[in-house]
Amino acid sequence: MSALRVGFGVEDVMALRSQVLARSAALRDVRAASEASGVLQAPGRAPGAGFADTLNNALKQVSAVQDHAGNMQVAYERGQVTDIAQVMLARQEAGVAFEATLQVRNKLLNAYQDIMRMGG
């Protein structure tokens, strides 16, 4: 019954280490993709003008994360990436980013509808 082992062996520790390193590399790739999309804003902008830019940059970030996840999946299918954990992590990151964007959109839409009801 090897499933009920109490201690960790060297192989277990090395396997865990490789998983952590792979996930760390995947997160670095996602961060690099989001930074490459030009997320930084120029200082000295008017406060009202920054909202549209911030929203646009957030959408570009989500798009970059989704593109990266798609590229990772294609690379896995071609055999260029052999670690399925990296691919799944990239897909999960893209899913979370999309879900967060959807929630922000819903909140903005609700706020807009509340403002429009106040006027009438």
Image (cartoon, helix red, strand yellow):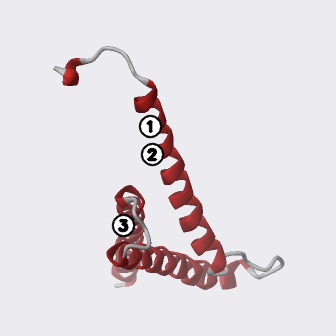
- Quadrant (top left/top right/bottom left/bottom right) for the N terminus: top left
Determine contact: label 3, label 1, CB under 8 Å. Answer: no
Residue 18, above or below 119? above
Task: Quote the CA–CA distance across marks 2 and 3.
Answer: 16 Å
User: Mark 3 sits on what residue?
Assistant: 91
Q: Quadrant of residue 85?
A: bottom left
Whichever of callouts 3 and 1 sits on the residue coming sooner in the sequence is 1
User: Mark 2 sits on what residue?
Assistant: 19
Which of discs 3 and 1 lies nearer the camera? The answer is 1
Q: Amino acid at mark 2?
A: Gln
Residue 118 percent location from the top left of the image: 38, 77
Which of discs 2 and 3 lies nearer the camera? The answer is 2
Mark identifier at residue 16:
1
Q: Residues within 10 Å of mark 2 (few under 14, many from 20)?
A: some
Left or right of 73 in this view: 45: right
Left or right of 104 in this view: 48: right
Q: Nearer the viewer, residue 104 or 32?
A: 32
Q: Callout 3: helix, strand or loop?
A: helix
Mark identifier at residue 81:
none
Residue 15 percent location from the top left of the image: 43, 39
Residue 97 percent location from the top left of the image: 42, 67
Q: Callout 1: helix, strand or loop?
A: helix
- Quadrant (top left/top right/bottom left/bottom right) for the C terminus: bottom left
Q: Amino acid at mark 3?
A: Arg
Q: Quadrant of residue 39?
A: bottom right
Q: Amino acid at mark 1?
A: Leu
Outermost residue toward the left? 1
Left or right of 96 in this view: 58: right
